[in-house]
Image (cartoon, helix red, strand yellow):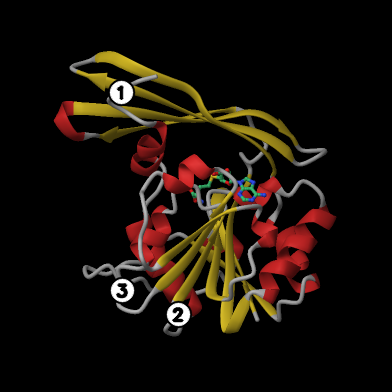
Amino acid sequence: MCALFNKHDLYEACVQSPEHLAPLLRAIHGGEPATLGEDFSGTAALSYEWVKRDGARAISADLDAAALAHRGDHERISKVVSDVTTVPDPCDVLFVGNFSIGYWHTRDELIAYLRHARSRMNPGGVFVCDTYGGESAFLTGDVHRPTPLPNGYICRYTWEQRHADPLTGMVTDVIHFRIERAGVIEHEFMDAFVYEWRLWSVPELRDALIEAGFAETQVFAKLADAWDDQGNAYVEPVADAEDELDDSFIVMVAGRV
Ligand SMILES: C[S@@+](CC[C@H](N)C(=O)[O-])C[C@H]1O[C@@H](n2cnc3c(N)ncnc32)[C@H](O)[C@@H]1O
């Protein structure tokens, strides 16, 4: 245990960027979405960003009661400690982030979940999940990134793909944090989060969305120039993968009702 740092705070600081994600999801929706469903929400960091806008509400669902409780209560966020397949609340945007769609390991599980997601969508609503693909998708290895923290600390964040099996699609992805100050590692959170996921390809997800009852699917790249100075986002679906996607990529896959 480390009294100074908590793995949920480090995850939010190093992995997430809700101030970018919330406007991106609003832009993908394309209208004035009021209600966000954040499935597999962890600490619900996106929901807290979403409800900063007047009239906006969020429903955040996760199995992990400690993660959901981490940020305390908010009058416009409903937190549900539950399997995401039991949450009935309707929403305009339903988001599944940080590759959590991979918790469904079989196609039957994936379709059942997406049918449930479809049943929650308000008219004009959009379901969005992210996935990664391309030439490095089934390679093992590490990606490192330093993130500055208050009081002169730096968090050295590592994303490790520990196992990857292109024959089953199963991957083991692990997050580690090392806290450094003045060149000395003071705290380590090794294997802070360990994920056993099925890495669904983009066409597998698009097919599954249609089978689950969505009318149309689109794919969006997270482009660095998607945001203006006011933080609004502007997106167009990927039209030509060869031109618009890198050899290895992270994309958002959307299903419209
Ligand atoms: C990778 S974290 C995602 C955190 C956050 N959504 C993000 O984008 O960074 C995955 C979360 O999914 C939760 N989870 C896994 N299976 C679940 C299920 N069937 N129903 C609800 N939550 C689930 C875990 O407890 C964990 O907090």
Residue 14 in percent (x, y) is at: 37, 39
Residue at disc 2, CB closer than 8 Å to ligand 1? no
Q: Which badge, 2 or 1, is on the more N-terminal residue?
A: 1
Q: Secondary structure at mark 3?
A: loop
Above or below, 101 relative to 144: below
Q: Amino acid at mark 1?
A: Ala
Q: Secondary structure at mark 1?
A: loop
- Labelled disc at residue 155: none
The residue sitting at 36% across, 71% down in the picture is 233
- Labelled disc at residue 33: 2
Which quadrant would the C terminus be assigned to in this image? bottom right
Left or right relative to 22: residue 202: right
As measured in the structure, the alpha-carbon distance from the residue carrying label 2 to the one carrying label 3 is 11 Å
Q: Amino acid at mark 3?
A: Arg
As measured in the structure, the alpha-carbon distance from the residue carrying label 3 to the one carrying label 1 is 33 Å
Which numbered mark, 3 or 1, is in the foreground of this view?
A: 1
Residue 154 in percent (x, y) is at: 26, 28
Left or right relative to 252: residue 68: left
Q: Which badge, 2 or 3, is on the more N-terminal residue?
A: 2
- Residue denoted by label 3: 53
Depth order, front residue of 243/114:
114
- Residue denoted by label 1: 3
Which quadrant would the N terminus be assigned to in this image? top left
